[in-house]
Image (cartoon, rainbow, N blue to C red):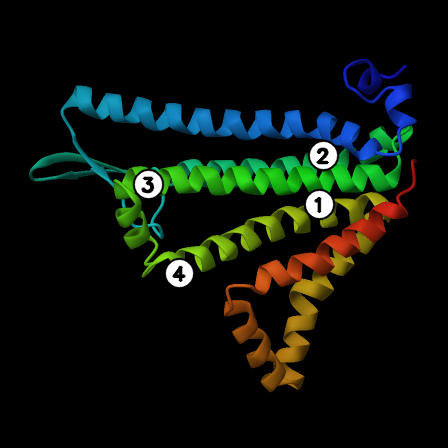
Amino acid sequence: MTAVQAQSPLTRDSLARPRQWTSMTRLLLPDAARSLLIATVVMLALLATTTLFAWWRGWELVTMTDTDVIGVEVAAGKDGVTLVASLFLMPVAAGVAAVVMAIVLAARTRVFLAAGATRRSLATAHLVTLLVMMLYVLAVTAVVLLVVGRGTDGALDLVIAGGGADAVLLVAAAAGSVLMALVGASLITAIFLRWPWWVGVGALAVVIVLLPAVVEVAWPALADTVGRLMDWWGFNLVAVVPTAAIYWLVMRRMPVR
């Protein structure tokens, strides 16, 4: 019995079930949730420690409300020292942790396959885990917006939303962006696992560098259309579907060794 089998619900009985993906999800999800929670708590602790230090030193504390400016800065002026901090570092930390976990979980694919998991169940469990991580990142973002904005109205003002309809579109756009990042990271990892490294590097070079350059030079009208589509709030929600489908196909042909 492998270490994965000994420490998880991936047992011989669970492998025999027709809905094995549920067992795989119970295996993947706790690790992902734990990592995201740790990243959030650590960032909150760092912000709290910095705030307490500034209070102890008698510095002026300023909470950044601009969602485009994220970080911590200490500025010295004629009136003393000012600490400018952004609570939006917390959703950023959660988002980075989610992308890292998407890569880590995808990188363990061969281990799970060698332990007896099917490719279908593993791919399904991985996508479900990505969906849960996306929801967690959105939840942390919503909490920070409510805290910084001091309520619903303030939160809507921070994201420049005119009402409930605008808020729904912003949530949908944010969900698509986060999910696209997670699925894209998983797909890239799966490609490097499935084929030699030069295949993955070549694919990234073609998609990211060569193809956009060729379209920009040869079909400028098409490039403009694609640019307008990328500015549409639902672009990532639509694009994530074929990306997930390609990931699924790559996973379905993943070798064990």
Q: Is residue 27 above or below residue 245?
A: above
Q: Give the Cα distance between marks 3 and 4.
A: 16 Å
The residue lying furthest to the left in this view is 79
Front residue of 216 and 27: 27
Q: Are marks 2 and 1 in contact (CB under 8 Å)?
A: yes
Answer yes or no: is residue 72 visible.
no
Residue at 29% x, 40% y is 148
In the image, residue 39 above or below residue 193: above
58 left or right, relative to 201: left
| Rendered residue at 47%/39% (across/down) | 139
Check disc 2 and report the residue beneath it.
Answer: 105
- Secondary structure beneath dot 4 equals helix
Q: Which mark is residue 166?
A: 4
Residue 186, numbered circle: 1
Quick one: SS at disc 1?
A: helix
Mark 3 or mark 2, which has the lower sequence index?
2
Q: Amino acid at mark 4?
A: Asp
What separation in Å lies between label 2 and label 1 (alpha carbons)?
8 Å
Foreground disc of the pair 4, 1: 4
Q: Which mark is residue 146?
A: 3
Circle 2: residue type: Leu
Quarter occupied by residue 59: top left
In the image, which is nearer the foreground, mark 3 or mark 2?
3
> Is 41 situated above or below 18?
above
Q: Is residue 253 visible?
A: yes
Q: Position of residue 159 (x, y in %)?
A: 35, 54
Q: Amino acid at mark 1?
A: Ser
Q: Residue at x 69, y 40 (%)?
A: 128
Badge 4: few (under 14), some or many (20 or more) residues near its Cα, within 10 Å? some
Label 3 or label 1, whichever comes before in sequence order: 3
Q: Position of residue 133 (x, y in %)?
A: 59, 38
